[in-house]
Image (cartoon, grey):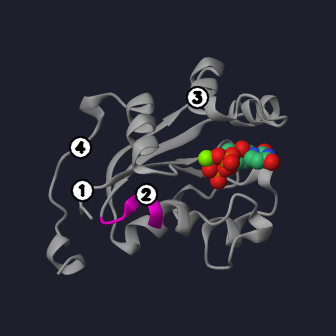
Amino acid sequence: MSTTERTFIAIKPDGVQRGLVSKIIERFEVRGYKLVAIKMVQPTQEHLETHYQDLKTKPFFAGLIQYMKSGPIVAMVWEGLDAVRQGRAMLGATNPLQSAPGSIRGDFCIQTGRNICHGSDSVESANHEISLWFKEDELCSYKHNSQNLIYE
Ligand code: UDP
Ligand code: MG
């Protein structure tokens, strides 16, 4: 496992509008993950359809795209050991009613269609999503000041 694993995490329009940006960022910061990219964006329909291309045939697809288009999104890349799997665990289950208390969705939202955040589900999809949402020069390479305190 690599300490340079990266995951794509996004705060969806409802998370932004509900004032949860700082709280969601804080979870990853205090855990010890390193922020390598962040921006606020209002993606096009086409961009969102590409992001969710695997779900194109699902009955909720059109509603999902409408939801994701309803306002700005905060897009981020977080780096660290097991970042993809831990990121998903920190977000909680897709359905917030099944998300454990202590997870982001378990603490801040109630319904699947308004579940405030996105996280990559594998290293492969993380790499794909990072390149879809960020240009290479938007990703920052630097050493975390606390690297030696977070890792053995
Ligand atoms: N979604 C929905 N209804 C469903 C399943 C999913 O509205 O029955 C939405 C929800 O916002 C979810 C997103 O579609 O976060 C992507 O679905 P996925 O199964 O990839 O869940 P995730 O990876 O976000 O946990
Ligand atoms: Mg998914």
**Disc nearer the start of the sequence (3/1):** 1
- Whether residues under marks 4 and 1 lie with C-beta atoms below 8 angstroms apart, the answer is no
- What residue is pinned by disc 4? 140
The crowding category of the residue bearing disc 3, from other C-alpha atoms within 10 Å (few below 14, some 14 to 19, many at least 20), is some
Indicate which label's residue lies in the foreground, 4 or 2.
2
**Disc nearer the start of the sequence (3/2):** 3
**Disc nearer the start of the sequence (2/1):** 1
Give the distance between the C-alpha atoms of the residues marked 4 and 3, in whole angstroms: 22 Å
- What residue is pinned by disc 2? 84
Indicate which label's residue lies in the foreground, 3 or 1.
1
Could you tell me which secondary element the residue under label 2 belongs to?
helix
The crowding category of the residue bearing disc 1, from other C-alpha atoms within 10 Å (few below 14, some 14 to 19, many at least 20), is some
Residue type at numbered disc 1? Thr
Give the distance between the C-alpha atoms of the residues marked 3 and 1, in whole angstroms: 28 Å
Residue type at numbered disc 2? Val
Question: Is 142 left, or right, of 132 in this rendering?
Answer: left
Residue 14 shows up from this direction:
no
Could you tell me which secondary element the residue under label 1 belongs to?
loop
Give the distance between the C-alpha atoms of the residues marked 3 and 2, in whole angstroms: 24 Å
- What residue is pinned by disc 1? 4
| Residue in the picture at 38% in, 31% down | 131
The range drawn in magenta is: 81-86
